[in-house]
Amino acid sequence: MGISARREREKQYRRDTILTAARDLFFAKGYRTTMEEIAERSELSKGTLYLYFNSKDELYISVIMEGFRLLEERMNRALAGAKGTEERVKAIYFSFIDHCLENREYFRITQYFLTEDARENTSHDLVETINGYTGELLEPGVRVIQEGIEGGEFREDTNASDIALITWRMATGILDLAVMEDEADGGAENYRELFETAIETLLRGVRKRKE
């Protein structure tokens, strides 16, 4: 291995080390985690952290984006195995529900970022990065619902973007309730069933009635 390749590998190793330390601390302490604590956990100087990340906000959002990428991969796998429009719609949103129930820490730190205080202290570019990726995560739902409209399964007056957003926010609201419960209470399955009822109700409203 050449010197250049070795240096790149070392840089990537340090970046990954910093991100792992930040993730562990954000999951445990939330946004109040300091750069000093991240430096101590990663066994690097605070100055070294700033060579890889410009701020704590950038680190925080990097962890959120990591969760988004895991969710996107799960959605793609679910879609690949689903058949039929309604099954594909459910595959998208149940992959979201299941991802968040199984990775509650990612969900919690993402929800904090949506608060006004968090966004006021975050640069416009970083906010736009999150907004852009959130929009990309909504696209599969929009696309499948639109296919249902064009295929005659859903009503012609259905707005695919609106329904995709409503379903996403409905899922998020149910997840907000779920993460408040102790996982030992077995509440996860109850909330998954609640979402099953909610999405069935929504789909019933957009189905095209047979003549």
Image: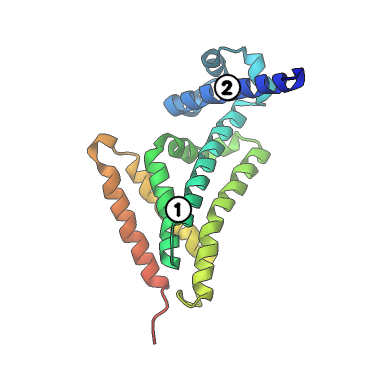
Task: Where is residue 23? Give x, y as percent.
Answer: 50, 27
Relative to 52, say whether 141 is above or below.
Answer: below
Do the residues bearing badges 2 and 1 touch, measured as CB atoms within 8 Å? Answer: no
**Nearer the observer, 192 or 82:** 82
- Looking at the rendered image, the quarter that the C terminus falls into is bottom left
Kindly identify the residue that appears in the image at 58 percent across and 25 percent down.
16
Per the rendering, the mark at residue 78 is: 1
Front tag of 2 and 1: 1
Task: Where is residue 41? Give x, y as percent.
Answer: 51, 15
Would you say 79 lies left or right of 120 here? left
- Looking at the rendered image, the quarter that the N terminus falls into is top right
**Nearer the observer, 181 or 115:** 181
Residue 86 seen in render: yes
| Mark 2 or mark 1, earlier in chain | 2
Which quadrant of the structure image shows residue 108? top left
Query: Residue pushed farthest bottom?
Result: 211
Q: Which residue is mark 2?
A: 18
Q: What count of labels does the image hold?
A: 2
Colouring rule applied to residues? rainbow
Q: Amino acid at mark 1?
A: Ala
**Nearer the observer, 5 or 42:** 5
Q: Amino acid at mark 2?
A: Ile
Residue neighbourhood size for the residue with mark 2, other residues' Cα within 10 Å, grouped as few (<14), some (14–19), many (≥20): many
Which quadrant of the structure image shows residue 43? top right
Residue neighbourhood size for the residue with mark 1, other residues' Cα within 10 Å, grouped as few (<14), some (14–19), many (≥20): some
Kindly identify the residue that appears in the image at 56 percent across and 38 percent down.
65
Residue 159 seen in render: no
Q: Which SS class for mark 2?
A: helix
Per the rendering, the mark at residue 188 is: none
Would you say 15 lies left or right of 108 here? right
Relative to 179, say whether 166 is above or below.
Answer: below
